[in-house]
Image (spheres, rainbow, N blue to C red):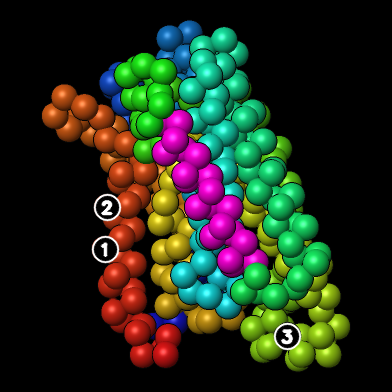
Amino acid sequence: MKIAPLYMNILLLAGLACIAFMSLFIGAASLTPGEIFAALTGTASDSVQIIVLELRLPRVLLGIFAGATLGLSGAALQGLLRNPLADPGVIGVSATASLGAVTAIYFGLSSIFPLAIQILSMGGALIATFTLSVVSRRDSSVLTLILAGIGISSLATAAISLAMNFAPNPMSLQDMIMWILGSLDNRTMTDLSLAAPFILLGWALMFNIGQGLNASSLGEETAQTLGINLNRLRLQVIVGSAISVGAAVSVCGSIGFVGLVVPHMVRSLIGHAPGRLLIPSALLGAILLTIADLITRMPVGHGQLRLGVVTAFVGAPLFLYIIYKTRGAMR
């Protein structure tokens, strides 16, 4: 069954609004809809204001921002690289951002300066962006970009493993592992204000590339005859996804499978035109990550579920199912 993109976007936006509002209720303290509404309008008691505005609302907003970023970046990269397996991890941004966070923990910077993890994570993402930008200027081959991304990701992963291997103490090692597994717990408006400008900048670069992606899907020569500047298109997608994903990883940790799975889910509902996938992929990515965060709030044994674990357990089987259903179209 196919759905018109406009109706799809309206349905997803309505679903996201409902899930986001519902997530404000989930937590240790039980609140009524009236208290939630009063907190949002600034008329609730101080304790309710703190719970809603300083604890739950930043968590919900960061989940929306990060999920939308991963979904949008996955759709843009799959369209640009014409590869259904492309996602933000392919270009190495997620790994380099994680390396920045691990570096901050390894050297104890996070205990000296609270925002060290976020700042070094975005620094790592910017290094990957710069490297890919240099590669994209010197060689416009899609294969070169993919191989460069794999190389950057492998190098960053090796450095993370090295840091964990020589962790200065067990507590630092545990902090590294817990951060890499991803979480939205204890995030504040400060985290949101730090990441949001970079995320919005990345969105601005990627939301107007629909026509270029549609043309590039017809082949590079055809796209050039239609007046599409492929080098500029590649630079927009790479820089936009790198900046926004790096900012999202800096506050949420490493989150896998959202950018990979979401475009496939949307594609099965509205068709294969890459330009059409951008907005619904962003909305569906926000919904999935918000739901995944709700799952992490459920009590499980003596520990706490981590966001990356939930997305992997949900995303991996779903991805295998999608591959099984569309295996004929991928030949």
In the image, taking residue 195 as reference, residue 266 lies left or right, namely left
How many neighbours does mark 3 have within 10 angstroms: few (below 14), some (14-19), or many (20 or more)? some
Residue visible at 45% across and 31% down in the picture: 163
Q: Which mark is residue 139?
A: none
Three-letter amino acid code of the residue under disc 2? Phe
Write down the quadrant of residue 276 in the picture: bottom right
> In this picture, is 223 found above or below 79?
below
Three-letter amino acid code of the residue under disc 3? Glu
Q: Quadrant of the N terminus?
A: bottom left
Three-letter amino acid code of the residue under disc 1? Pro
Q: Which residue is mark 2?
A: 313
Secondary structure under tag 2 reads helix
Label 1 near label 2: C-beta < 8 Å? Answer: yes
In the image, taking residue 238 as reference, residue 179 lies left or right, namely left
**For residue 44: magenta?**
no
Q: Which residue is mark 3?
A: 220
- Give the mark nearer the N terminus: 1 vs 3: 3
Residue 73 location (% of width, % of height): 58, 58
Residue 209 location (% of width, % of height): 72, 68
Residue visible at 29% across and 70% down in the picture: 320
Magenta residues span: 145-164
